Amino acid sequence: MYLTEEHDFFRKSFADFLKKEVVPHIDKWEETGTIDRFIWPKFGEMGYFGLKYPEAYGGTDLDIFYTVIFLEELQKINSGGFAAAMWAHAYLAMTHLKAEGSEEIKQKYLSASIAGEMIGCLAISEPFGGSDVAGMRTTAVKDGDNYIINGSKTFITNGVYSDYLIVAAKTNPEAGNKGISIFLIDRDTPGVSASKLDKLGWRASDTGEIAFADVKIPTSNLMGEENKGFFYIMQHFALERLIMGINAHARAEHALEYTLQYMSERKTFGKEINKYQALRHKMAEHLSNVEVNKVFNYNIAHRLDQGDYVVKEASMSKLMSTKMADEVIYDCLQMLGGYGYMEEYPLARMLRDSRLGPIGGGTSEILKEIISKMVIDKKNYKPST
């Protein structure tokens, strides 16, 4: 319904690119926790960072299903950390550049980001806040033609090696969520420091904790309007949550493909294990759940591309798809027996990487409350105008 021959061609060419340029380096990047810088301009040269961005800044302004394919194929190289580094740059940091950045900011940062010459990160979560965006403590105090920023952020993908940061801070702390603003901060600005966090999974990506100590930036680095930051964040969360839902159905699909191939070759008591009814039926159930989530996610992607405000559906996508992926990958690892627990087989890493799905970008518990407010309390979230 949604994919054309052009989409299929793009999928094949991107898969070939990943196999040639990325896969040979993945194990090294997983081990070191550092993605070599050379890969970013390669993505830029091929246009992969500009799929949904205007041609005026070097993008190709394509429909959302090119992004869907981009996300799906990244899951097939079995490095959630590498995938996260790419999409956090292209769809978290750059989404704010496009939506709230001034023309000057877009010319300097969005164009360079599309080209892979600059790397961005989005810094919202805090050590004491987590999914509670309104409870953030980082402040931005206006001082003449500057803002002075103090505070800290944590769990930030690309938080250590990015060139710029899109940062949420309170410009009016007494106003709660109505007093948050969004700023662009260059990495080399005095007072900015970062340290890398040691994680269970996503090990190729640099997830960082960032501190701001009297960081002075010009007022021109304000993104959009002052005190409108919470509404910008909420508006873009729909895309982030859908991205994580798409990632989940894609990695579950990949895990099943690998496991079914393994089951067709692995024999016990003289027959392939895909001939045992209990195991076949378990796989049939998981295949069905993947297909249901995938079709739902495609539908939401289409609606988002048409301009619909899909915060409820995107929250449902992330909630259900990440839970499904964890269950699928858990059982896929079991099908490999002892080999599933070995690092030389892909399921061990996949299990670790998948576990972040129900946590990052809003925990499942937070999403359940958001959905409850919308469907039970009839709360009507509105897009920022």
Image (cartoon, rainbow, N blue to C red):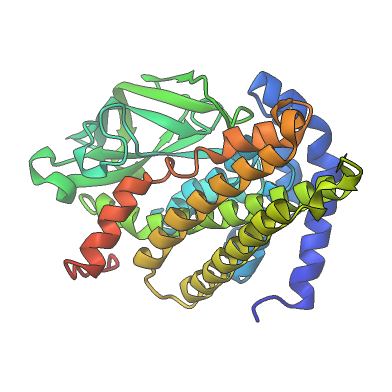
Whether residue 18 sits left or right of residue 320 in the image: it is: right
Q: Position of residue 300 (x, y in %)?
A: 49, 70
Q: Please state which of residues 320 and 337 is positioned toward the viewer in this rendering.
A: 337
Residue 101 in sight: yes
Q: Please state which of residues 371 and 155 is positioned toward the viewer in this rendering.
A: 371
Q: Please state which of residues 53 and 55 is positioned toward the viewer in this rendering.
A: 53
In the displayed image of the protein, which residue is found farthest to the bottom?
Answer: 1
Q: Please state which of residues 34 and 326 is positioned toward the viewer in this rendering.
A: 326
Q: Residue at x 45, y 52 (%)?
A: 97
Residue 224 in sight: no
Q: Which quadrant would the N terminus be assigned to in this image?
A: bottom right
Q: Quadrant of residue 156?
A: top left
Q: Position of residue 151 (x, y in %)?
A: 27, 25
Q: Quadrant of residue 24?
A: top right
Q: Residue at x 82, y 68 (%)?
A: 9
Task: Give above or below for 358 relative to 371.
Answer: above
Q: Quadrant of residue 176?
A: top left
